[in-house]
Image (spheres, rainbow, N blue to C red):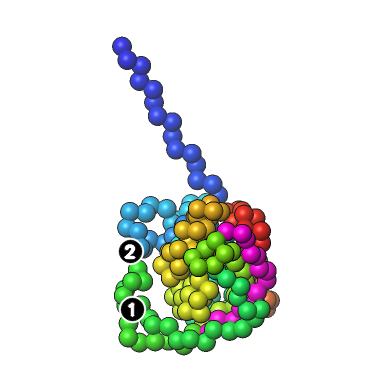
């Protein structure tokens, strides 16, 4: 008789890293590739940050904002509906200071700002643009540069910059669209970036993710008389990419 071996159960989900928690809020380090909640972006996906965190801490959570699926970093939730709504309003009213880090193609100027209106999206998955535009402002500071002996397009070398970004508005894909607009696209951005630069990064440096991360948020607590500052280290895959390109 044929021996039938029972299939082993799937490995348990690794716990989400908690960066901050009080009696009203919790912040996690969202890994790249994880959706915040169910979305038309991928109707077959079954894993969502909101569900994983709920199961991990044993209570409902209420997202105060969102970050793109391929972006890693800080994601904030209210532990009750009132808290989630209050902080969501803070994000809408620009009362939350946000900091991101990214790797871009080329040597970005040392500092500056990108003040360029962006078209709204008419659909939830971010494909159809409206004729209506919204003001959008992103400041940036270059942190480091590298130049590597790999020909790319019409150049003899490959150049990258590590930059810190401070979006003053919160438009959809704002940082990604702004950097593409000034011709310093983020490496790994398959929607707004440069396909040739992305392929070059995959081929030579094994980079298979969007190199954008939410690294710090700061806000006045809606219910306590205190300033909350939350920082987040770069995900291991992001840090590995920096090592591969000597940044």
Q: Which mark is residue 40?
A: 2
Location of residue 43 with respect to 76 vertically, above or below: above
Q: Residue furthest top?
A: 1
Q: Is residue 46 visible?
A: yes
Q: Is residue 43 left or right of residue 141?
A: left
Q: Which mark is residue 55?
A: none
Q: Quadrant of residue 51?
A: bottom left
Q: CA distance from mark 2 to mark 1?
A: 16 Å
Q: Quadrant of residue 40?
A: bottom left
Secondary structure beneath disc 2?
loop
Residue 171 x, y percent position in the rendering: 46, 79
Q: Which span of residues is magenta-colored?
A: 137-150
At 47% from the left and 79% from the top, the residue drawn is 181
Residue 182 x, y percent position in the rendering: 51, 79
At 59% from the left and 66% from the top, the residue drawn is 159
Location of residue 192 with respect to 244 vertically, above or below: below
């Amino acid at each position: 008789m044929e021996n039938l071996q029972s299939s082993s159960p799937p490995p348990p989900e690794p716990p989400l890293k908690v960066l901050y928690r009080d009696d009203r809020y919790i912040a996690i380090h969202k890994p790249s590739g994880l959706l915040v909640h169910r979305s038309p972006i991928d109707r077959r996906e079954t894993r969502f940050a909101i569900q994983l965190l709920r199961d991990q801490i044993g209570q409902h959570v209420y997202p105060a904002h969102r970050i793109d699926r391929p972006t890693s970093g800080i994601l904030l939730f209210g532990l009750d509906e009132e808290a989630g709504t209050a902080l969501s309003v803070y994000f809408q009213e620009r009362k939350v200071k946000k900091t991101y880090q990214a790797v871009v193609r080329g040597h970005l100027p040392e500092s500056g700002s990108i003040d360029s209106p962006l078209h709204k999206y008419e659909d939830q998955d971010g494909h159809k643009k409206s004729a209506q535009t919204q003001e959008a402002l992103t400041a940036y500071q270059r942190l480091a540069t590298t130049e590597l002996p790999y020909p790319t397009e019409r150049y003899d070398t490959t150049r990258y910059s590590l930059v810190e970004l401070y979006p003053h508005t919160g438009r959809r894909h704002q940082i990604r669209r702004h950097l593409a607009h000034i011709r310093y696209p983020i490496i790994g951005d398959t929607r707004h970036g440069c396909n040739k630069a992305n392929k070059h990064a995959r081929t030579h440096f094994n980079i298979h993710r969007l190199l954008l991360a939410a690294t710090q948020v700061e806000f006045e607590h809606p219910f306590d008389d205190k300033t909350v500052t939350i920082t987040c280290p770069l995900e291991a895959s992001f840090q590995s990419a920096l090592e591969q390109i000597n940044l």
